[in-house]
């Protein structure tokens, strides 16, 4: 049953390519065609996940292309396809950008196909193929409004940051081959020899942390908010940023086998959840708050990968995808209606229109980790595994969960403030409410997956048994802590939750990256250019001019000597000819005398020689 599996990434990739090639001629039909293709892709993902398909085809010598929908990739493939379908349906309802809808929809479909390739890849070369296409299309989607210099600059920053980290996957592939993983199957990487196993793990961790915007690479996600709302809802919920966390969950045995990779990964995730949670609390821009919260929530998934909590990390990824795509779409709807992303300017947004307020509240409460919504239950599963590994790791994760309640409540506090007297209610389009309502329902419907007996069944599917289950006391502690933090944040009010400038400015991470990486690289490039211009180019010019002068002088000397030699030879030949003509008088007696003289000379020679 490999046909649905091959068709799963091929359908959105082919459909997106057709829309891109058709261009403006498909602008009118593109939103509808994209939504239909996305829904069909979602159906294919469901079929492939139920069948547990596996497909193999020739790719490179000794490296076949393998796709597999197994325990971990099956729920992820369905989630990616479902979120893409709902986001494109919302875009069709009016949230998409007004310019070049065919190009936008085509890129969204290609991005979805690349993410599905990444999720279903069973070997590192196939995963790299999807990973690269995903990075390129994310650059084009973030900078879709190419006339906006800030958007294109943010797209370039995101691309260069993630692209630099992506080089780790190439290092991992080379180390995997050197270590004995001939087919580069993801499941074989943990069985490679040292030190290649550690090099492979280091490359995977670097690529994953960069793609998932974890510390110290979190800053690129801040600028990526310049993209259209559907781009943020897709790329920063279940796809691009989730790809790094998925890769770490998928290669969990490799991290554990190194002896250091799992610990480093777990603490990187916990630190990001805590620090970027503080950054989210400090934001006064709704999309920036959601972006920082994305980094923090992905930190829990990375923590789960390091702690070996595959089930908890998967549940966190699914629940976060539903909540965050819902919140990003609603922020885009309010941006188009109110013309601002600043929280003070969105006062009353949840009241006008009233249909959007409960939806945003559902997503924010889920993000806050309040019971009984999905992220509360998912966090308990992964924090239970963190507790068995290191109590300090558990405490850090618990503090990050409390901050999630604070920044989510801050957003709610602003949007539920009384609207200004002159405010008018933007229309709530039924076509937009349908996908938003489905996402809100998913925030609650996913909760049973984290509770017995469905959690036990999911653990069997993921083959992640043996992990400790959260006790009732742990669930009560995390839920009570989230409720207390939310109540405290609401009582404090939004303005009094503002933190100092370093947190508002994302800890100055982008400035630090420019100071530590960009400026030194540019300075080195300028130095190399100056060395090339002032030293190498001048040396080359000097050598060239010297060679030309030598050629000219050699040419003059050789031409003069050769000309004199030719002239001398000609003069000698001329004199010889003149001398040879003298005996030729035309008188017979002189010829006879010359003959007698010649024979006499010969006779003398013969006599003397003998």
Image (cartoon, rainbow, N blue to C red):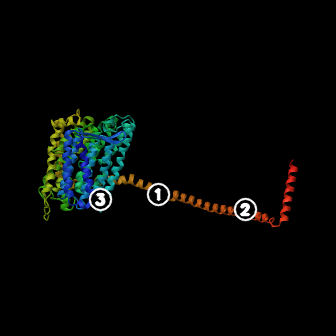
Residue 133 horizontal/vertical position (percent): 31, 50
Residue sitting farthest toward the top: 466
- Residue 355's label in the rendered image is none
Relative side of 65 to 593, left or right: left
Location of the N terminus by quadrant is top left
**From mark 2 to mark 1, how far is it between C-alphas?**
56 Å
Asked where in the image residue 524 lies, by quadrant, the reply is bottom left
Closer-to-camera residue (377/103): 103
Q: Secondary structure at mark 1?
A: helix
Q: Are marks 2 and 3 in contact (CB under 8 Å)?
A: no
**Circle 3/circle 1 CB separation < 8 Å:** no
- In this picture, residue 287 sits left or right of residue 535: left
Disc 2, SS:
helix
In this view, the residue in front, 147 or 332, is 147
The percent coordinates of residue 332 (x first, y second) are 20, 57
Q: CA distance from mark 2 to mark 3?
A: 81 Å
Which residue is the site of mark 2? 569
Q: For mark 1, what is the residue?
A: 529
- For residue 206, what is the image quadrant? top left
Which sits in the foreground, 505 or 51?
51
For the residue carrying disc 1, how many other residues have a C-alpha within 10 Å: few (<14), some (14-19), or many (20+)? some
The residue wearing badge 3 is 151
Q: Position of residue 184 (x, y in %)?
A: 34, 39
Callout 2: few (<14), some (14-19), or many (20+) C-alpha neighbours within 10 Å? Answer: few
């Amino acid at each position: 049953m490999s046909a649905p599996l091959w068709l799963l990434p091929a359908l959105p990739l082919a459909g997106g390519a057709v829309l891109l090639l058709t261009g403006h001629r498909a602008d009118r039909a593109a939103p509808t065609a994209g939504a239909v293709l996305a829904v069909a892709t979602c159906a294919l993902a469901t079929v492939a996940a139920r069948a547990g398909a596996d497909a193999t085809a020739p790719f490179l010598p000794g490296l076949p292309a393998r796709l597999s929908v197994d325990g971990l990739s099956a729920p992820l493939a369905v989630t990616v396809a479902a979120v893409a379908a709902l986001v494109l349906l919302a875009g069709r309802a009016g949230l998409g950008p007004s310019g070049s809808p065919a190009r936008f929809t085509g890129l969204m479909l290609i991005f979805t196909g690349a993410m599905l390739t990444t999720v279903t890849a069973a070997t590192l070369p196939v995963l790299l193929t999807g990973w690269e296409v995903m990075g390129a299309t994310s650059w084009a989607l973030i900078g879709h409004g190419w006339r906006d210099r800030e958007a294109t600059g943010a797209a370039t920053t995101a691309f260069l940051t993630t692209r630099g980290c992506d080089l780790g996957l190439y290092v991992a592939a080379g180390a995997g081959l050197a270590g004995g993983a001939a087919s580069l199957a993801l499941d074989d990487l943990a069985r490679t020899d040292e030190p290649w196993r550690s090099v492979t793990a280091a490359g995977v961790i670097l690529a994953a942390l960069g793609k998932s915007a974890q510390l110290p690479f979190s800053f690129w996600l801040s600028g990526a908010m310049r993209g259209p709302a559907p781009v943020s809802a897709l790329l920063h919920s279940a796809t691009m940023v989730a790809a790094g966390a998925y890769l770490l969950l998928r290669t969990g045995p490799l991290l554990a086998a190194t002896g250091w990779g799992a610990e480093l990964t777990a603490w990187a995730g916990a630190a990001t959840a805590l620090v970027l949670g503080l950054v989210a609390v400090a934001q006064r821009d709704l999309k920036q708050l959601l972006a920082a919260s994305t980094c923090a929530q992905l930190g829990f998934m990375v923590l789960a990968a390091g702690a070996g909590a595959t089930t908890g990390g998967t549940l966190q990824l699914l629940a976060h995808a539903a909540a965050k795509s819902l919140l990003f779409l609603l922020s885009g709807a309010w941006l188009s209606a109110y013309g601002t992303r600043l929280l003070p300017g969105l006062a009353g947004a949840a009241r006008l229109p009233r249909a959007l307020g409960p939806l945003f509240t559902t997503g924010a409460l889920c993000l806050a980790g309040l019971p009984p919504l999905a992220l509360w239950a998912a966090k308990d599963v992964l924090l239970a595994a963190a507790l068995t590994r290191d109590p300090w790791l558990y405490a850090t994760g618990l503090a990050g969960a409390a901050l999630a309640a604070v920044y989510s409540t801050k957003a709610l506090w602003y949007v539920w403030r009384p609207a200004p007297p002159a405010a008018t209610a933007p229309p709530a389009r039924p076509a937009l409410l349908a996908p938003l309502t489905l996402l809100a329902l998913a925030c609650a419907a996913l909760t049973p997956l984290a509770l017995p007996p469905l959690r036990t069944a999911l653990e069997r599917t993921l083959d992640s048994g043996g992990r400790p289950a959260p006790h009732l006391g742990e669930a009560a502690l995390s839920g009570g802590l989230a409720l207390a933090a939310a109540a405290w944040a609401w009582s404090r009010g939004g303005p009094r939750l503002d933190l100092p400038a370093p947190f508002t400015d994302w800890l100055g991470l982008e400035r630090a990256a420019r100071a530590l990486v960009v400026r030194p690289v540019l300075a080195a490039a300028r130095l190399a250019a100056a060395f090339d211009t002032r030293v190498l180019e001048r040396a080359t010019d000097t050598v060239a001019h010297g060679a030309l002068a030598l050629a000219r002088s050699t040419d003059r000397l050789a031409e003069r000597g050769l000309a004199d030699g030719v002239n001398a030879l000609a003069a000698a030949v001329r004199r010889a000819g003149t001398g040879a003509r003298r005996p030729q008088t035309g008188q017979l007696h002189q010829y006879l005398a010359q003959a007698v003289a010649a024979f006499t000379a010969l006779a003398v020679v013969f006599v003397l020689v003998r």
